[in-house]
Amino acid sequence: MLEQVARVLCWLSVGEIASRSGLLPLPAPVTGLILLYAELVTRGELPDDLGALADRLLQFLGMFFVPAGVGVIAHLNLLKAEAIPILAAIVGGTAATLFVTMVVVNRFGFAIANDQRRTSASLEGAARDVNS
Amino acid sequence: MSTLDQLSALTWNSLAEKPVIETGATVLAFWAATRLSRLGGSHPLLNPTLLAIIFISLGLEATHIPYETYLRGADTVHFMLGPAVVLLAVPLFRQRAVVRASARLIAVGLAVGLPVGVLSALGIAWALGASSQTILSLAPKSVTAGIAIGISEQIGGLKTLTIVLVIMTGITGAVLGPIIARLARVEDPRVVGLTMGIASHGIGTARALQISEVAGAFSGLGMSLNGILTAILLPLIWKML
């Protein structure tokens, strides 16, 4: 388990160095995420205790942004003053994103399914041709 | 100042040096928030993070403890965010077979959902006269909070404001997702899940998991990939402007 903790902190540190030195305009944890994923793909397998560590920690992911979130009390006036644009952007923007994305992806999903059906149909046809 | 006051101030200061109280209060608040959320059938409106933020804020208000003092103590909890985000690589790795099998569907979802998500929010906020600070804090609203904080910092938004906007977006997506799927006559759980993850990150994913396991898996993927891609693209585009 200690090895896995060290592994996570190691990739996070690399991300931190890359971010602080201005090498990558990426948040350090995101660089760490990408590097850990790359390492796992290279290894081809997930160490058991790394999986356990992830399950345990991600269970409380919501707790880890409480301290930063409480900072919003410093911006209550801003939230109040701009309540209408903020609410409209969140509700309107999220609704638009959901609708547009679902419709486009669904149509595309049908296209793939039809494509596959057509491919398998033509393959069947080819097989029938060979048999006849 | 009476001796008693001095004594209590002294005791308080020595305790405030150590993060025990703030960390303990944060864990306790989140535990209570989780219990309350479960009692309410895990309804998206009873988001444990939002409830815990409200509990702590009310507590600070009542005790007149400044936010900076609290944050210094609760920094231990805040620190865990970094390692936790790195560990998001694990569920992503577990789902790699699904990613490969539905790569094109996922790519289309991201190509549409990511820009529509960012631009629709920025466009509406800008049109209704929001300040540039609010607009910048809104930009990563669809991204999972751990990553969104980093993006907000990179582009000059207020990270504390971003967290609350992110949670509000998550709740909105979790509530609207299934309703809009019905309106748009979309039944494919892969499409519904993927879209909810892209539009409303972890909170949307929790709701998608209630629809079905497939919807939940695709939602988790949508959340992770959208978070990574937004983190790569948004600061880059911001730098070019």
Image (spheres, rainbow, N blue to C red):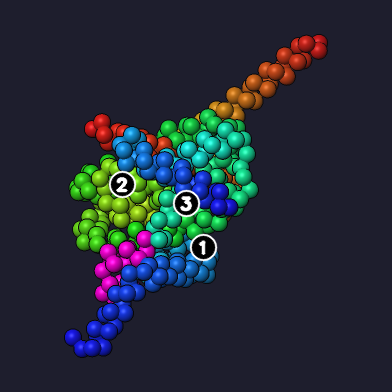
Magenta-drawn segment: B58-75
Q: Can the viewer see residue B184 in this picture?
A: no
Q: On the image, numbered disc 3 is attached to which residue? A: B84
The residue to which callout 2 is attached is B152
Where is mark 1, residue-wise? B42
Circle nearer the N terminus (1, 2): 1
- Asked if residue A125 can be seen in this view, the reply is yes
Closer mark to the observer between disc 3 and disc 1 = 3
Q: Looking at the picture, does residue A47 appear above or below residue B43? A: above
Which mark is in front, 3 or 2? 3
- Any magenta on residue B62? yes
Q: Which quadrant holds residue B4?
A: bottom left
What is the count of numbered marks?
A: 3
Q: What residue do we see at 29% from left, 60% from top?
A: A72
* In-image side of B111 versus B220 (left or right): left
The residue depicted at 54 percent of the width and 37 percent of the height is: A39
Q: Secondary structure at mark 3?
A: helix
